[in-house]
């Protein structure tokens, strides 16, 4: 690389006396006159750079005096093993170049001593990412994406990318952002639901990781207007099959993160790590309604189960659980209805937070059309989708995980904005 030979975490492997160039940000400076120290960090680690009158050029000493916290620098030096240096070695400065200066004070404290408010941190997200904890959360986000992709590739799934610009509502709801598409009206997709179902005809097993949009003026710690969704759809499967895939994915993520050797310890939720060898419990909708009633909660069969309801049930705190077999009226048109009026559906919860929702889909065109009509939706707006159900649509099932919410559970954070790089809500459109 033009400006550096190594990342800082690679330096410990270098031999005594090796000359090398690093680049990064000044974390700290200490001036003892004849000896000056700079602590330099990059995205991997930090290292102590030392300047002494007798071993480094005079002009570097003068330059070091003008260097401030967060200036971007390039340092050429030699490795010296040292018992007193924290890392067991330091870099003896030979040349220093300031690549860019930083203004002071910074909009927020990045060395973790004073916690700025979430709003200030979000207003300055790139600077917030220089705080070790924030950086760790998003590196962990990337690890979880990697584990997830590997999990599905290994199982023979095909990764797909479906359109974000669509012509009709996916589920018939009104919560879509509208946009001008040349001389037509178009919308931002709220989910890849209909596309992923269609793709089971040719590809059988698909998954997609991408952002989707909901146009509701949410004001909660678990909703955003743009969120990352992990979707799967599997041909010839039912809801039990895809629940098993989901439980297996949670177990795999937990196991793999546990292996990362403490690197993410401070941002990992112990309760999540228990799932490397713990089963996910399962309750029917009816059972949960009865549990809510037993705790004195007010709920009627057929009503949605809210976070407030779940909070009443102490036994469900800090754990994953499935809620299955929801009544027909609580689920979208594409979910398969059983003869008893319940559906082949499930939600995955962690405490009172819904992480995932899925089920067996209806593959019979006539039954689908009846359901769309029964729900008061306009059949003609789904005609382009429904036509494929006449040409060999296989039975299929799938689910969608809110990835930012999953990351809330993995990190133990209680606001979705902590696990979203640039959150979009009704009050926030920048940065
Ligand atoms: P909720 O009832 O919590 O509003 P939903 O029933 O609208 O969610 P689905 O449409 O079933 O959610 O979406 C599947 C998953 O996507 C949810 O379980 C959730 O994890 C995630 N999700 C849905 N809407 C949002 C949102 N606005 N912000 C963040 N994640 C979301």
Image: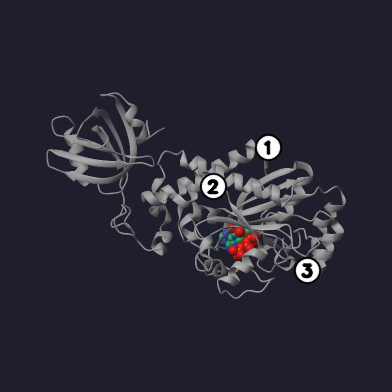
**Residue beneath label 1, please?**
156
Q: CA distance from mark 2 to mark 1?
A: 25 Å
Residue shown at the point (56%, 74%) measured from the top left: 296
* Between 362 and 424, the one nearer to me in the picture: 362
> Which image quadrant shows ligand 1?
bottom right
* Between 247 and 393, the one nearer to me in the picture: 247
Question: Does 87 sit left or right of 228 as displayed?
Answer: left
Residue shown at the point (81%, 69%) measured from the top left: 374
User: Around disc 3, counting alpha carbons within 10 Å, would you say few (fewer than 14), some (14 to 19), or many (20 or more)?
Assistant: some
Q: Which corner quadrant holds the N terminus?
A: top left
Say if 140 sits above or below 325 in the image. above
**Residue beneath label 3, please?**
377
First in sequence: mark 3 or mark 1? 1
Q: Position of residue 28 (x, y in %)?
A: 25, 46
Q: How many marks?
A: 3
Question: Does 42 sit left or right of 410 as displayed?
Answer: left
Question: Does 211 sit left or right of 263 as displayed?
Answer: right
Q: Position of residue 136 (x, y in %)?
A: 42, 47
Question: Does 312 sit left or right of 131 as displayed?
Answer: right
């Amino acid at each position: 690389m033009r400006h550096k030979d190594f990342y800082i975490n690679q330096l410990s492997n270098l031999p005594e006396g090796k000359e090398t160039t690093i680049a990064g940000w000044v974390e700290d400076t200490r001036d003892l006159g004849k000896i000056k120290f700079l602590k330099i960090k990059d995205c991997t680690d930090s290292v102590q750079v030392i300047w002494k009158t007798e071993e480094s050029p005079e002009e570097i000493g003068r330059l070091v005096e003008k260097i401030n916290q967060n200036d971007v620098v390039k340092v050429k030096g030699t490795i010296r093993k040292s018992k007193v240096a924290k890392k067991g070695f330091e870099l003896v400065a030979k040349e220093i170049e300031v690549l860019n200066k930083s203004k002071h004070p910074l909009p927020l404290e990045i060395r973790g001593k004073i916690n700025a408010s979430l709003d200030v941190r979000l207003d300055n997200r790139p600077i917030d990412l220089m705080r070790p904890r924030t950086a760790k959360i998003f590196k962990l986000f990337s690890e979880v994406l990697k584990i997830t992709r590997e999990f599905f590739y290994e199982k023979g799934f095909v990764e797909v990318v479906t359109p974000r610009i669509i012509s009709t509502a996916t589920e018939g709801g009104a919560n879509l952002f509208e946009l001008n598409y040349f001389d037509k009206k178009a919308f931002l997709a709220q989910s890849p639901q209909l596309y992923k179902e269609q793709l089971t005809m040719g590809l059988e097993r698909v998954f997609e990781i991408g952002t989707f949009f909901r146009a509701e003026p949410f004001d909660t710690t678990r909703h955003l207007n743009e969120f990352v969704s992990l979707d799967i759809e599997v041909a010839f499967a039912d809801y039990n099959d895809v629940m098993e895939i989901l439980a297996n994915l949670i177990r795999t993520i937990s196991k793999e993160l546990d292996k990362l050797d403490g690197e993410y310890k401070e941002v990992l939720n112990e309760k999540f790590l228990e799932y490397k060898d713990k089963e996910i419990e399962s309750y029917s909708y009816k059972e949960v309604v009865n549990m809510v009633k037993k705790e004195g909660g007010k709920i009627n069969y057929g009503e949605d189960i809210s976070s407030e309801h779940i909070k009443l049930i102490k036994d469900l705190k800090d754990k994953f659980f499935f809620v299955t077999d929801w009544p027909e009226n609580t689920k979208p048109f594409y979910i398969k209805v059983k003869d008893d009026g319940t559906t082949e559906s499930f939600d995955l919860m962690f405490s009172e937070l819904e992480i995932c929702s899925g089920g067996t889909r209806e593959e019979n065109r006539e039954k689908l059309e009846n359901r769309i009509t029964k729900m008061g939706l306009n059949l003609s707006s789904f005609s382009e989708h429904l036509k494929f159900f006449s040409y060999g649509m296989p039975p299929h099932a799938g689910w969608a995980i809110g990835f930012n919410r999953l990351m809330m559970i993995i990190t133990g954070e209680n606001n979705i904005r902590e696990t979203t790089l640039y959150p979009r809500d009704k009050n926030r459109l920048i940065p």
